[in-house]
Image: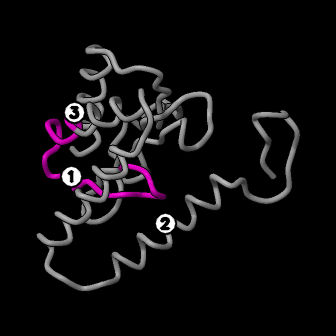
Amino acid sequence: MSTSQETGTATRGFSKEERAAMKARAVEIKAESRGGSRSKKAAADEAAMLKKIAEMASPDREIAERLHGVVTAAAPELAPKLWYGQPAWARAGKPLCFFRSGQVDKERYSTFGFSTEANLDDDGGLWATSFALTELTEAGEKRIAELVAKAVS
């Protein structure tokens, strides 16, 4: 059951945005199962991700563009791709970190997060796996670069 942001009331089933994300993921899985050279696949994945970013409304578009630069500089071994129809960076085909547009998801804020593939500080039983983003400052870029470098180590 999900909650409508507009009315605050509970609704049955998946939201329109959730259904769209599931359909996008099904298309991604089908594309992943097709053969082809790795370099062509990587180029196609990055082109699809950059196209999706270009389609985003401001300020999410600018945030996603900057995140792409930060992530690829911090971990050039990660491959850009789409994950549930939104930007992600993967190792061995598995998303390690991702950006979720709040505008696309019709949420209050966008998020940058890490999947279970990431090497995070698992000590103490509590650690952050995603961060709310309403803007991306220089300090935020630096922190994300540090986290991404840690995640791939």
Look at the image and tell me in which quarter the C terminus lies: top left
Q: Quadrant of residue 73?
A: top left
Task: Identify the mark nearer the N-term, 3 or 2.
Answer: 2
Residue 89 location, x and y as percent?
A: 29, 51
Judged from the image, the secondary structure of the residue bearing numbered disc 3 is: helix
Cα–Cα span, label 1 and label 2: 19 Å
Whether the magenta-drawn stretch holds residue 152 is answered as: no
Where residue 88 sits: x, y (%)?
Answer: 35, 50
Q: Which residue is mark 3?
A: 70
State yes or no: residue 78 in magenta: yes
Task: Identify the residue at horizontal 11%, vertical 70% (top origin).
Answer: 39
| The residue stretch that appears in magenta | 69-87
Query: Dot 3, crowdedness within 10 Å: few (<14), some or many (≥20)?
Result: some
Residue 38 lies in quadrant: bottom left
Q: How is the image coloured?
A: one colour
- In the drawing, does residue 41 fall left or right of residue 86? left
State the residue position of label 2: 25
Identity, as a three-letter code, of the amino acid under mark 1: Leu
Mark 1 or mark 3, which is nearer the start of the sequence?
3
* Local crowd size for mark 2, using a 10 Å CA cut-off: few (<14), some (14–19), many (≥20): some
Task: Identify the element where label 2 is drawn.
Answer: helix
Q: Which residue is mark 1?
A: 78
State yes or no: discs 1 and 2 in contact (Cβ < 8 Å). Answer: no
- Residue type for callout 2: Arg
